[in-house]
Amino acid sequence: MSTDSAPLPRARGEAWGEGSPSADGIWHGLRFAPDTFDDSEPGVEPNALVVRDGAIAWLGDEAALPREFTNLPRHDGRDMLVTPGLIDCHTHLVYGGDRADEFALRLAGATYTEIAARGGGIVSTVRATREASEGELFAAASKRLQLLLAEGVCAIEIKSGYGLDLANERKQLRVARRLGEAHGVTVSTTFLGAHAVPPEFAGRSDAYIDRICNEMLPALAAEGLVDAVDAFCDTIGFSAAQTERVFEAAARAGLPVKLHAEQLSDAGGAQLAARHHALSADHLEYLSEAGIAAMRVAGTVAVLLPGAYYTLREIRKPPVEALREAAVPMAIATDHNPGSSPLLSLLVAMHMACTLFRLTVPEMLAAVTRHAARALGLQATHGMLSAGRPANFVLWDVRAAADLAYWMGQRPVAAIVRQGRIAAGI
């Protein structure tokens, strides 16, 4: 991509920034994906952008390049398609162990109840996460994160929820912060203490909610480890009343909320999330018309998670057509987790959302850029290409945006600019 003949570096881990070249300069010969840039000059089709001091300083027709930029280094885009950096807005990336053995048991006919009776399910991940050191969690999560970064992910949400006590939730969130620093990627941390009832609180879910609201959340928020607060409101999660208490505690801490809602039943979670102006409501297979109406009014993003739908062999799909008609913004995420969605490809999630849920190509692209940014409260800095935003963009060796979801197993990344540095290139 650069006029220098030396190859650009591949994505880095701990040494992010050391030797990763600055992306400052004129990036020309680009084809901008539709609806991904700020149309500050109506009718002008941009084909170039300028990066200066790690931010996009200008974009437009190269023939109109301002003179102040003409002496900057040049990077030939070679007619590649450019999009904003992709955003994976729902993951559980930090955890101990895995549950491949449970996957094999299910294939052999074991039921969820039988696996849980053997100490499996989320309890097994909690146990493995508690036993793992911070360093072990970081090393394992780094490998998973690098797979996502290699596909053009420039911002990612990472939830806690496998510690279920203060020390281990803190450990997960500390690792999430370290991942962002080490890999040069925007990480939005979400406290999901209300993910499940830990073994030591079995039969005492209200007491555990007390612990979350009065001890865990205030402490973690005070330490600056939390960007948002989530909960699992459903038949095997927490009730609407319990979830509301968590949301009220989040409000006291000045934190936005989001919700695992309507995955297994219509528990009224979407309406509850909307009442608290949630950033997003996620899963939504059982979302009702009332829930859609509430989300529309509140501006809450619908995050679709086809990986979990596929892995769990669900038969009820999120009501995409009704969301579309109501103009509720839809996002797509991997929902990477060791149990219900061991998916480490946002490109595959995009393909699944199109094939299983029937999203259109424009909807698919918006779902991993501007709508995903909104689901994380990052819409002012991520998800669109415009002057003044941090330089996070991807060059793709494809004809059109449809190719990003059309191919399965192909990674057509030509170059990645993340946080103003060239993270990968040809």
Image (tube, rainbow, N blue to C red):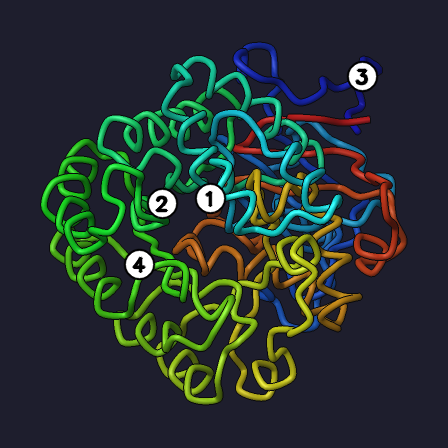
Estimate the spatial distance between the alpha carbons at disc 1 and disc 2, rounded to whole Å.
Answer: 7 Å
Residue 169 pos. (x, y %): 30, 33
- Determine which residue is flagged by label 3: 7
Alpha-carbon span between mark 3 and mark 4 = 43 Å
At 57% from the left and 17% from the top, the residue drawn is 13
C-alpha gap between disc 2 and disc 3: 37 Å
Residue annotated with mark 1: 157
Query: Which numbered disc, 1 or 3, marks the residue that appears first in the sequence?
Result: 3
At x 55%, y 54%, the residue is: 383
In the rendered structure, which amino acid carries the disc numbered 3? Pro
Identify the element where label 3 is drawn.
loop
Tell us which disc is closer to us: 2 or 3.
2
Q: How far is disc 2 from disc 4 in space, using C-alphas?
A: 9 Å
Q: Nearer the viewer, mark 3 or mark 4?
A: 4
Q: How many badges with numbers are in the image?
A: 4
Does residue 423 lie above or below 189 as drawn?
above
Find the distance from the CA under tag 1 to the CA under tag 3. 31 Å
Q: Which of marks 1 and 2 is nearer the N terminus?
A: 1
Q: Which mark is residue 190?
A: 2
Estimate the x, y position of residue 331 in percent, counting from the top left.
Answer: 57, 62
Q: Is mark 4 on a helix, strand or loop?
A: loop
